[in-house]
Amino acid sequence: MIVTLTANPSVDRTVTLAEPLRRGGVQRALAATTQAGGKGVNVSRVVAAAGVATVAILPGSAGDPVSRALSEAGIDHRIAPGGGPIRTNYAITEIDGTTTKVNEPGAPLDAERLWALTELLTELSTTATWLVLSGSLPPGVPADWYVELLRRLRGPRIAVDTSDAPLAALARQVDSAAPALIKPNSDELAQLTGADVERLHDPVEAVRAAGQLVDRGVGAVLATLGAAGAVLVTAEGAWHATAPDITPCSTVGAGDSALAGYLLADLDGDAPADRLRRAVAYGTAAVTLPGTGLPGPGHIDLDAVSVTALNSLPRR
């Protein structure tokens, strides 16, 4: 089973434009969609679509839009009740797939609700194979909370996908709180390692940077590099995957879909190269779907993804 934590859930509103975004102008939308979201929720949605058991943990209430949407979709979830309203995140997608995001900060979480979330994680971690700590932290939550959870929860393997202050806290303390998997994009990999972000669009440089994290105890680094594909680095070696050129619709949820694809492949016992292949297939499929659409097994094309071993590359 895959358990996901979304400490800062959202209602994701995506507006698709027929032409490039004009700052300060008035434009008409081709379409608009609304979907229950947050990075962990997205992972659970993709995992559930594949027919694999998942539980999404999040703050909220039984009647809020995210909980209601998860119930309607038949996705198992647990709520730490109380607090303020669910935030709305906005994505403006242009016709070429360029996506501009504006994310609200979210309702503050007090110590009582944070403890309730921790208790839910502790309870469900006893039966989980993977636990995903995903997304931003709302106001009031210490930036090192993910680090605290990594030290506290010893049962399942833990994957982390976050950014900004929580990622910086993890970077400072990763030697003593190393997750089984980190899934950064190129900007986040630069934040974790201090590497030049422009150079990380080169898979060779991305592998070298990711290797620093593996040397510090991280089990695996799955780094998504946009049009350059993705790399996977473990203690066993390194691999680079690319997919054919596609016509993008929206990048919303692409990274979450890639993470879900990797975890699904891991549950199936796939070798590292095939875990990366499925991650890229899922991430690519997400980009071809409009709005906040997320892929299921019928959307992915494993044969279209090319994987190359880079095991001989020095990491320093």
Image: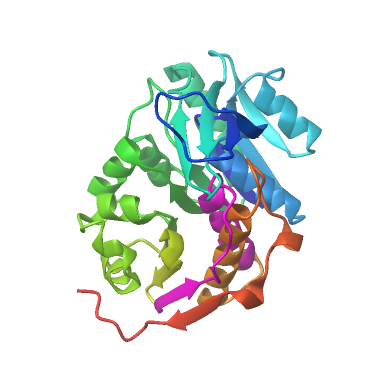
Residue 256 magenta-drawn?
yes
Question: Picture coordinates of residue 176 (x, y %)?
Answer: 28, 52
State left or right for residue 162 relative to residue 91: left
| Image quarter in which the C terminus is found | bottom left
What's the residue at 43%, 55% (across, down)? Answer: 183
The quadrant holding residue 193 is: bottom left
Q: Is residue 132 above or below residue 279?
A: above
* Residue 250 appears in the rendering: yes
Q: Residue furthest bottom?
A: 312
Question: Picture coordinates of residue 229 (x, y %)?
Answer: 46, 66
Question: Picture coordinates of residue 13 (x, y %)?
Answer: 59, 30
State left or right for residue 301 relative to residue 277: right
Residue closest to the eye, 309 or 12: 12
Q: Is residue 109 above or below residue 290?
A: above
Q: Is residue 46 above or below residue 297?
A: above
Q: How many marks?
A: 0
The quadrant holding residue 123 is: top right
The quadrant holding residue 208 is: bottom left
The magenta span reads: 237-265
State left or right for residue 142 relative to residue 14: left
State left or right for residue 267 relative to residue 189: right
Question: Picture coordinates of residue 105 (x, y %)?
Answer: 43, 23
* Residue 216 appears in the rendering: no
Residue closest to the eye, 185 or 135: 185
Residue closest to the eye, 33 or 61: 33
How has the structure been colored for display? rainbow
What's the residue at 60%, 47% (across, down)? Answer: 43
